[in-house]
Image (cartoon, coloured by chain):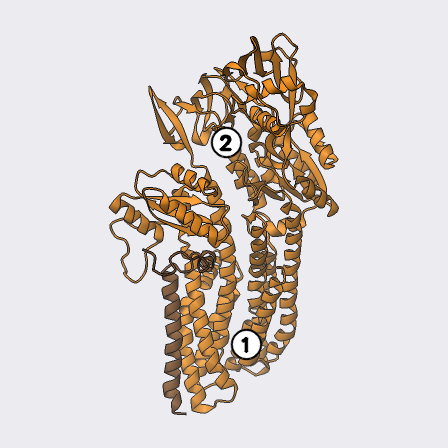
Chain colours: A orange, B brown
Amino acid sequence: MNTAVPTQVSGCPACAASPAAEALAEQSKSGDARILLSLPTIHCSGCISAVERGLLAHPGVKSARVNLTLKRASIEAAPDVEAGDLIKALDGVGYTAHELDRGLLSATENDKAGRDLLMRLAVAGFAAMNVMLLSVAIWSGAEAATRDLFHWISAAIALPTIAFSAQPFFKNAMRALSVRRLNMDVPISLAILLAAGMSLYETTQSGEHAYFDAALSLTFFLLAGRYLDHRTRAVARSAAEELAALEVPRATRLNGETEEVVAIAELVVGDLVRVKPGGRMPVDGFVTEGASEIDRSLLTGETLPVFAGIGQSVSAGEVNLTGPLTLKVTAAGEDSSLHVMADLVAMAESSKNRYTSLADRAAQIYAPGVHLLAFVAFAGWLWISGGDVRLALNIAVAVLIITCPCALGLAVPAVTTAASGQLFRKGMLIKDGTALERLAEIDTVVFDKTGTLTEGRPELTNLNDHDIKDLEVALALAEGSSHPLAVALVDALNEANVKAATVTDLKEVPGYGIEAQFCGMPVRLGRAAWVDAEASEMTATYLSVGKASPVSFTFVDRLRAGAEQAVAELKAQGKTVHLISGDIPAAVQAMAERLGIENWVAEALPEEKASAIGAVTRAGARVLMVGDGLNDTAALAAAHVSISPATALDAARVASDIVLLGVDLAPLAEATVIAEKSVSRIRENFGIAVVYNLIAVPVALLGFATPLAAALAMSLSSISVSLNALRLR
Amino acid sequence: MEMLVYLIPISLFLGGLGLAAFFWALKSHQYDDPEGDSQRILSPDWEDEPRP
């Protein structure tokens, strides 16, 4: 992270300071603001220039640079430029943008660890090529003084390179040994160090075989695997942090007469907070002023909005729909219900960490096996040759080099890099390293309803049941409100080419509905009780015209694009599909029948969702949970693997292993196919490594291995493993 | 064989030059946005003059 002090940009003029630190320094000099925007929809050179032009045209913007790889723009502007204005400007040229919290992003913006690995990889590659060149001369028959000279030059290149490039392996091995454990890096470090040491000794003795080239190419291939692994993780981490940073957490606090925008962390119990219509409750509290309706679907899965008047308690995460509300804070930050839910997730998560990946399982067999084999070779040849330590050690080194896990080290990262790249193009983001393997194992899929299978947007169902006159009045009234049901009604009526009636004295009564005068009669559109209608079980709004009995407009939640396809394909793959929702039975049953899901549960509480998944798991199934709400988080964490849409609350996204970036659900079924394919590629790669060891190890044990044979075998196995991984595309 | 005295240092020097060029590219943030850079060559902006 950034520890650089603004006054001192970088101590060494040759090496650039981290970009964030430089920006910090610049900012303190000129007072400029630096704004980061996320641009999820950009994809080509046209987008880059349109966005940069659009930003530069905005007054006050000094420079704008788009990073297409990270789908981000960084802007330097005069201090009075607000991110909101820039977002509006970009909206005008047709791109959606979100503000990113720079504090959260600083870690990924300058990927120091990745650059460090790349540097070591480049040095190892450079040295390996040069030493290999010299080695080819030796293999083709250089003798006596020439061979010794070449060996000495090789040593001069190889030893400093190993000291620099192989450091990550040495450090990891030391860490494992200091807690008396074996990991993959112990045999790797041993092989590199022994090969270099033994070759140096052979060189001083004018010996025939030196393994400098093998030690270097080993370092190079293994570093390549490490780097791929790091890239995959870094991309996932940066995108996950980007999602977390999307919601810049702010609240409007009332100080007497004045309003002030503050960070949520600064709120304390007893503060008064204003929540505008359309805003999300930042804290737990109760209403002290105003009336409105609140949408709790993210917390409970209910689709029907709830009335909120003075005294009503609200929880963080609920959405205010119609009127402005003033809240008195009862719990903020760590104590709010959002955080309590997050603790629940943390507990469920720890059980997930017990999953051992394929690579770990291979390492558990591999690491002790290699040491044993090398030791057997050493002891055996010491006994056969009657005490020739030099010969025995040479053969043990050859065994270590030949068995060294080039293929194993590349087997997993090469495949996961290819697979996660493919999933990213389909709009899915893997957050967890083992998620792909776990996804390949699932046989049961559990869906949440509201916000997952549906978009959480209502759709009018009974347009044709009404008089044209009622429709005209309803449209006139609905246009006066931004309530989601009113908006949906306006959309549906506009599509049906209904003309709005002329009404007068239109006014919205927050929390109840809209009323007006039409031809001398009072007309009302809103909650059932307010218009003297009988409330039905469905999501509905009611219209009364004068003394006539009220009519109802019923709505269903709009199905998410691709939901039908995803469910059908998952069922075709032989997976059991469940629907568990917190909504009322009627709505859940209708959805289950529409999608052909036989197993459904309604009115499930958050704990019930998690325990339902626990029950299915105990029965032997591996569950994929797809959900978005706060009420799903415990279930997401309890499932074998979990997916949440990008529109989900951050608690749900944090708890899930894979994030669906697009709106479409259809990639879900493809993802399971890709996961299964990539796991079988990983297994094939292990197979290749095993076959190669079965042939090479006996040769090395019998003492026939030469540096040339070792170099050939190593390169062949590494290349075949990488090519096999590329077949995934 | 005396040529080796010249050839080996020359080959090492040339290789080292390549390595130094790579270091320079890495340190000057040229690997930060590979996808964007591959697209930018298609854009006519700043074609005749360097970016201000």
Q: How many marks?
A: 2
- The correct choice, above or below, for B46 with respect to A269 in the image is below
- The correct choice, above or below, for A709 with respect to A2 in the image is below
Q: Where, quadrant-wise, is the C terminus of chain A in this rendering?
A: bottom right
The picture quadrant where one finds residue A273 is top left
Residue A208 visible in this rendered orientation of the protein: no
Q: Residue at x 69, y 43 (%)?
A: A565
- Residue A711 disc label: 1
In percent of width and height, residue A658 lies at: 57, 45
Q: Earlier in the sequence, mark 2 or mark 1?
A: 2
The chain letter for the residue carrying disc 1 is A
In percent of width and height, residue A544 lies at: 61, 13
Labelled pair 2, 1 in contact (Cβ < 8 Å):
no
Q: Which residue is mark 2?
A: A338
Type of amino acid at the residue the image marks with label 2? Leu
Along the viewing direction, whichever of A221 and A457 lies nearer the viewer:
A457
In percent of width and height, residue A52 lies at: 40, 49
Q: Residue at x 25, y 45 (%)?
A: A30
Q: In this rendering, would A590 be left or right of A388?
A: right
- Residue A14 disc label: none
Type of amino acid at the residue the image marks with label 1? Ala
Residue A632 visible in this rendered orientation of the protein: yes
In percent of width and height, residue A140 lies at: 52, 87
The picture quadrant where one finds residue A463 is top right
